[in-house]
């Protein structure tokens, strides 16, 4: 007697049905009820509820058995049992370390699939990559005369077919190559877009210099950068809570002191590009119905199939920095959504899909208490700097507790106060902006330099009122430096290789080429 196995059992319901005829499920029912055949069907819980569970007579003829994903140790034993066919097919040898790495990394970083499927795919692709790398070396040493041989090899390099179906002779005289841990890490990195290489010497030094790297773009704000650096080091060392995001922070401070810039710098440092920053202006989520923008519209509403802005973007890019700007302007229902993200590291969208936030860093900014921070130095004539700082922090935290619920504040890793920028900080920011301008003009071949007097003039001209922070500096540099310089470039006063010095002359800025012999040829800018 045979046992019939039907994969995707739910497809039987309605299959082949027409007017006056039976579908495949109803044709199967009499044989199942008489016990003439033994049948095993496979389907997902969602499809079982949607199709088979509604047909009570069909459901009665089957005994539901829930198959849970195997554990990591069970998956390792599964891979050890099936690795031979992949080794023979790819002409490689999988080390035990590579198999353990495939299970560990796939379970940690690939969250939308299950074991052992994702681990098997990682092994398969790692073997294919090693095989292709070996093929490239062989082609360089002994190129084949026919391109069809190479094409045939390339098309068949990654497959789950049994080795009996195709025995390539391309490597018959070559030694078997080992697939090692580094090959597995390369596959995971390509799939996820995040560097998951082992903590080698160069990465160790990079992790220890996070503060230094972030300070290349962010001036001052040592507390914020130190808190972020600690969270990143915990995550890379494998010590973070596996069920929570990498870090969740609330940045408090006046406008223009670098809260958003810290998030941008962190995204570029961790993932190599600011595109890994997912930013939301929470002033767009002030209404009650705006919750659906984040997780998707309920069933029956327009846009239900499109999903939510937050869940869809994190689903496509789970390794990211999420910036929620001006969080105090969001509707209170938004905070109820965030509680689940901050505590459990996941969120369910309107389609029923669970989105993983465990590899994201969540940064929220707010201007609450900014007026207290800006009053620094005016707390009292007898107060020491430490007493003034403690008084300001107390007033700011009192304002924060009046605005946010305790259950929300209790789930944050850290609440960080950003200090107002000093004159020295503003001068450093001018240097950073000039460096950015020089990188932009690198293709033109022109370099801009500002004298110390010119920098101080720009700071005093634009930032005498510290209410707006450092944002006016960018506009001032555009008005007083970039605009006159662009006109001079169009008039061909400066060409490739020129070094333009901006200096103070009277109450205005002037610029001159310092790479020529006539430094007195200055142009006044008013």
Image (spheres, helix red, strand yellow):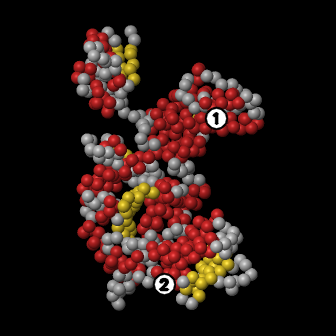
* Mark closest to the chain's N terminus, 1 or 2: 1
Q: Nearer the viewer, residue 129 or 479?
A: 479
- Residue 43 visible: yes
In the rendered structure, the answer to whether residue 262 lies left or right of residue 337 reads right
Badge count = 2
- Which secondary structure, mark 1? helix
Q: Residues within 10 Å of mark 1 (few under 14, many from 20)?
A: many
Query: Image point 65% across, 30% down: which residue?
Result: 151
Q: Mark 2 packing: few (<14 Cα in 10 Å), some, or many (20+)?
A: few
- Rendered location of residue 247, percent (x, y): 41, 58
Height in image: 226 above or below 113?
below
Pointer 2: what residue?
Answer: 460
445 displayed left or right of 329: right
Give the answer, above or below, for where 390 lies relative to 37.
below
> Would you say residue 349 is visible in this rendering?
no
Element on which disc 2 rests: helix
Q: Of 264 and 104, which appears nearest the observer?
A: 264
* Foreground of the two, 3 or 478: 478
Cα distance between the residues tagged 1 and 2 = 63 Å
**Rendered position, 188 above or below 35:** below
Q: Which residue is mark 1?
A: 131
Q: At 46% from the left edge and 81% from the top edge, which residue is drawn?
A: 462
**Image spot of residue 479 (x, y percent):** 51, 76
Q: Residue at x 57, y 38 (%)?
A: 126
Residue 326 image offset from top left, x and y in percent: 35, 65
Quadrant position of residue 391: bottom left
- Image quadrant assignment for residue 373: bottom left
Left or right: where 108 falls relative to 14: right
In which quadrant of the rendered image does the C terminus lie? bottom right
Q: Which mark is residue 58?
A: none
What residue occupies the far front of the structure in this picture? 491
């Amino acid at each position: 007697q045979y046992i019939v196995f039907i994969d995707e059992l739910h497809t039987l319901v309605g299959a082949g049905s027409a007017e006056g005829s039976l579908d495949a499920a109803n044709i199967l029912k009499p044989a199942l009820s008489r016990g003439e055949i033994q049948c095993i069907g496979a389907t997902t819980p969602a499809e079982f509820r949607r199709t088979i569970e509604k047909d009570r007579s069909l459901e009665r003829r089957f005994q539901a058995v829930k198959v849970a994903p195997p554990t990591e140790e069970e998956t390792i034993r599964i891979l050890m049992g099936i690795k031979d066919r992949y080794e023979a097919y790819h002409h490689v040898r999988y080390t035990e370390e590579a198999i353990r790495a495939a299970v560990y990394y796939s379970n940690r970083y690939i969250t939308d699939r299950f074991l052992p499927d994702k681990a098997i795919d990682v092994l398969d692709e790692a073997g294919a990559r090693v095989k292709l790398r070996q093929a490239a070396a062989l082609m360089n040493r002994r190129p084949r005369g026919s391109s069809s041989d190479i094409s045939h090899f390339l098309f068949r390099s990654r497959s789950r077919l049994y080795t009996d179906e195709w025995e390539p002779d391309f490597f018959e005289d070559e030694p078997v190559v080992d697939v090692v841990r580094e090959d597995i890490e390369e596959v995971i990195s390509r799939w996820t877009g995040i560097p998951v290489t082992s903590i080698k010497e160069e990465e160790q030094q990079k992790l220890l210099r996070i503060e230094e790297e972030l300070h290349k773009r962010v001036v001052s704000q040592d507390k914020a950068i130190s808190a972020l650096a600690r969270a990143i080091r915990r995550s890379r060392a494998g010590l973070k809570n596996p069920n929570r995001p990498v870090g969740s922070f609330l940045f408090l401070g006046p406008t223009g002191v670098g809260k958003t810039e810290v998030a941008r710098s962190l995204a570029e440092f961790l993932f190599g590009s600011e595109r890994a920053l997912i930013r939301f202006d929470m002033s767009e989520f002030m209404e009650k119905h705006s919750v659906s923008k984040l997780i998707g519209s309920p069933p029956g509403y327009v846009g239900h199939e499109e999903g939510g802005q937050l869940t869809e973007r994190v689903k496509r890019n789970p390794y990211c920095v999420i910036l929620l700007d001006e969080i105090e302007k969001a509707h209170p229902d938004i905070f109820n959504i965030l509680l689940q993200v901050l505590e459990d590291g996941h969120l369910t969208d309107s389609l029923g899909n669970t989105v993983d936030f465990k590899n994201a860093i969540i940064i929220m900014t707010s201007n609450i208490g900014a007026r207290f921070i800006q009053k620094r130095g005016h707390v009292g004539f007898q107060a020491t700097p430490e007493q003034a700082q403690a008084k300001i922090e107390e007033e700011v935290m009192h304002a924060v507790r009046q605005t946010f619920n305790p259950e929300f504040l209790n789930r944050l890793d850290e609440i960080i106060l950003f200090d107002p920028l000093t004159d020295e900080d503003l001068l450093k920011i001018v240097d950073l902006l000039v460096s950015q301008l020089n990188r932009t003009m690198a293709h033109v071949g022109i370099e801009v330099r500002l004298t110390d007097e010119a920098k101080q003039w720009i700071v005093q001209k634009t930032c005498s009122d510290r209410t707006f922070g450092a944002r006016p500096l960018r506009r001032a540099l555009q008005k007083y430096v970039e605009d006159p310089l662009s006109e001079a470039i169009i008039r061909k006063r400066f060409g490739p290789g020129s070094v333009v010095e901006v200096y103070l002359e009277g109450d205005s800025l002037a610029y001159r080429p310092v790479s020529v012999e006539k430094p007195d040829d200055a142009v006044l800018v008013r």
